[in-house]
Image (cartoon, grey):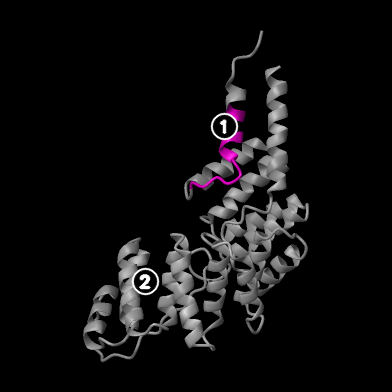
Amino acid sequence: MLVKDFASWRQRARKTARARRGATIFGALSLVLVIAGCGGFPGFGGASPASDAGPRLDARGEALAGMARQPSEPYWPFRLAELSAAADSIPAAVVHLKAALALNPDYAPALSLLTRIYFDSRAHAEAITLLEGTLARQPLAPVELRVALALHLDAAGERGRAEAVLAACPGDSRELRGARSYLSLRGDNVSGVLEAAERALEADRDNAVNHNNYGVALLCAGRPLEARDAFQAAIDRDATLAGALYNMAIVETFYLFNDSAGREWFARYRQHASDDPDGLASVLEADVSRLNAPKAR
């Protein structure tokens, strides 16, 4: 009776996961996104201004010296912010980025990094205000900033506005393809999802997030074996991409019914992140409890 009840519960859990199969899209933005930077958020590399030759300094020392020489140049506090972010000193990075934007409110590298940090901390309203201000002042601002605005609008629940921002973007850059793929996967309408993901992948096959999102699109199309290959391709390019690791656990557990492999992928995922939107932990832990339960006599 216990096994029968468990099997019934397990079947319901798997059906629920299948119904939600498009929901797990790590990477297209917080781990998830499409483009450059941490997990794929749009990014710019600030170009260091010319400086006089002098003694060779470490990166932080060089930035501080640059600020002393060129106090009105936003690159130097931006550079300090980059170094702080790389060292996981996020509060310090925010202080430096705000200093750079005080010098030039439309300095794209600082805007990009600050709004990426805001995305990770779910401060979407602040990012939207910043980006909309710049785009109102600078109609020809880089498309990456429009992509960032669309992603923040989507995360804030303003899907219609996000889609309108992307629709108004000129061209068909890899950033736009990636963002369109991400938004299509986030939506309720699965038509066009696979095509959007394929176009993003065609634009940048070295991007692990694109492979991850393509795998999710393949799941939406009912092709789990190919999806597994896509997630593996993502992991081959970035072994720490949490979304791809989690999605591999999803495929193995809910689609291919290989709980052992699912547990292994889920354990790897747990080394990098803790979110569990599809309730994998409860399913896999229940499996372990069942296997370890005393045998009925």
Task: Residue 257: tell me if it is visible.
Answer: no
Residue 228 position within the rendered picture, expressed as x and y whole percent measured from the top left: 69, 52
Residue under numbered circle 1: 285
Q: What is the three-letter code of the residue carrying label 1?
A: Glu
Q: Secondary structure at mark 2?
A: helix
Q: Is residue 106 magenta?
A: no
Task: Residue 139: tell me if it is visible.
Answer: yes
In the displayed structure, 5 sits above or below 283; it is above
Q: What is the three-letter code of the residue carrying label 2?
A: Glu
Residue 32 position within the rendered picture, expressed as x and y whole percent measured from the top left: 56, 61
Residue most extreme to the top: 297
Q: From the viewer's perspective, is 98 left or right of 161? A: left
| Quadrant of the image containing the C terminus | top right
Instruction: Give whichever of 182, 48 is nearer the camera.
Output: 182
Instruction: Give whichever of 255, 275 is nearer the camera.
Output: 275
In the displayed structure, 296 sits above or below 84; it is above
Which residue is at a point 44% across and 65% down the rendered structure image? 118
In the displayed structure, 197 sits above or below 261; it is below
The picture quadrant where one finds residue 143 is: bottom right
Residue under numbered circle 2: 82
In the displayed structure, 123 sits above or below 109; it is above
Which residue is at a point 59% across and 63% down the rendered structure image? 209
Q: Earlier in the sequence, mark 2 or mark 1?
A: 2
* Magenta span main SS: helix
Q: Secondary structure at mark 1?
A: helix
Which residue is at a point 61% across and 71% down the rendered structure image? 161
Residue 121 position within the rendered picture, expressed as x and y whole percent measured from the top left: 43, 59
Answer few, some or many: residues within 10 Å of disc 2's Cα (few below 14, many 20 plus, some between 14 and 19). Answer: many
| Stretch in magenta | 274-288
Answer few, some or many: residues within 10 Å of disc 1's Cα (few below 14, many 20 plus, some between 14 and 19). Answer: few
Residue 105 position within the rendered picture, expressed as x and y whole percent measured from the top left: 39, 82
